[in-house]
Image: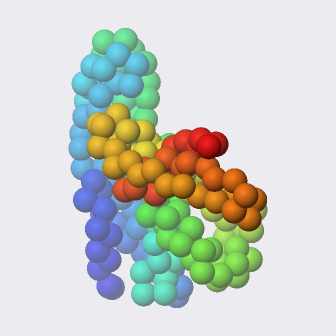
Amino acid sequence: MLSISLELPEFEVIKQLSFSNQYFVHVQKKCHEERCPYCGFMTSYVHDRRTRKVRDLPILNHSVCLFVLVKRYQCQNCQSVFSESYESIQPNKQQTNRYREYLFELCQDTTIQDVSRKQKIPYSILERIYYSVAQEKAALHQKQIHEALDKDERVLSLDEVSVQKGHRYETVLTEAKLGCVIGMHKD
Ligand SMILES: [Zn+2]
């Protein structure tokens, strides 16, 4: 059987199953300790394990399903029980980050309907993924703008633009590197 290289360094492969048009890959996180999200204490005490099914990027025209063996830890400081976290999968998502990104890019080139059919993902789910990735990208862009402004790395440019067919002029202040308008002033 073909051995699949996932290129998700945080995981080790436990088992691979190959079917006519899909791969099932059982994985677990290599790391055996986790920081408690409530108090910050490191713990390696495993409370229980459960399996979570997550879609990943297709390989050689096969769809890929990851079966992630999720460890739930119990904090030895505050007794909270929590699941381990992943770099490549967000909490409560049924697709890896890179697969969500891939679906978003596919939808940019064609229609959600077309991608839904080809990737065999229900339209409503794909639509939700598309808009949530778009939102994440917008939030990231906003964050980058604020970081650039905070670092005082502004490259400001002042331009006069004519409005109302040249009857009026306004001064526009833009951040040249980010290409965004910061303010406008009527003359
Ligand atoms: Zn804790």
Q: Nearer the viewer, residue 47 or 21?
A: 21
Q: Residue at x 30, y 28 (%)?
A: 35
Residue 83 at x, y percent in the picture: 43, 35
Q: Quadrant of residue 47?
A: top left
Residue occupying the point 25% across, 24% down = 42
Specify whether 29 is left or right of 176.
left
Residue 119 visible, this orientation: no
Residue appearing at x 24%, y 44% in the figure: 31
List the single residue furthest toward the front: 167
Residue 11: quadrant of the picture:
bottom left
Q: Is residue 116 left or right of residue 16?
A: right
Depicted 24 relative to depicted 68: above or below: below
Q: In this rendering, would 12 be left or right of 85? A: left
Residue 148 in view of the camera: yes
How many labels were placed on the picture?
A: 0
Q: How is the image coloured?
A: rainbow
Question: Which is nearer the eye, 63 or 160?
Answer: 160
Q: Tell me the quadrant of the picture where the N terminus can be found.
A: bottom left
Q: Image height check: is 168 above or below 114?
A: above
Residue 176: horizontal and vertical position, in percent? 40, 55
Residue 99 higher or lower than 62, as above or below? above
Q: Residue at x 25, y 59 (%)?
A: 9
Q: Measuring from the top left, give residue 39's x and y in whole percent.
A: 35, 16
Residue nearer the viewer, 8 or 22: 8
Q: Quadrant of the C terminus?
A: top right
Q: Residue furthest top?
A: 78
Q: Position of residue 34 (x, y in %)?
A: 29, 33
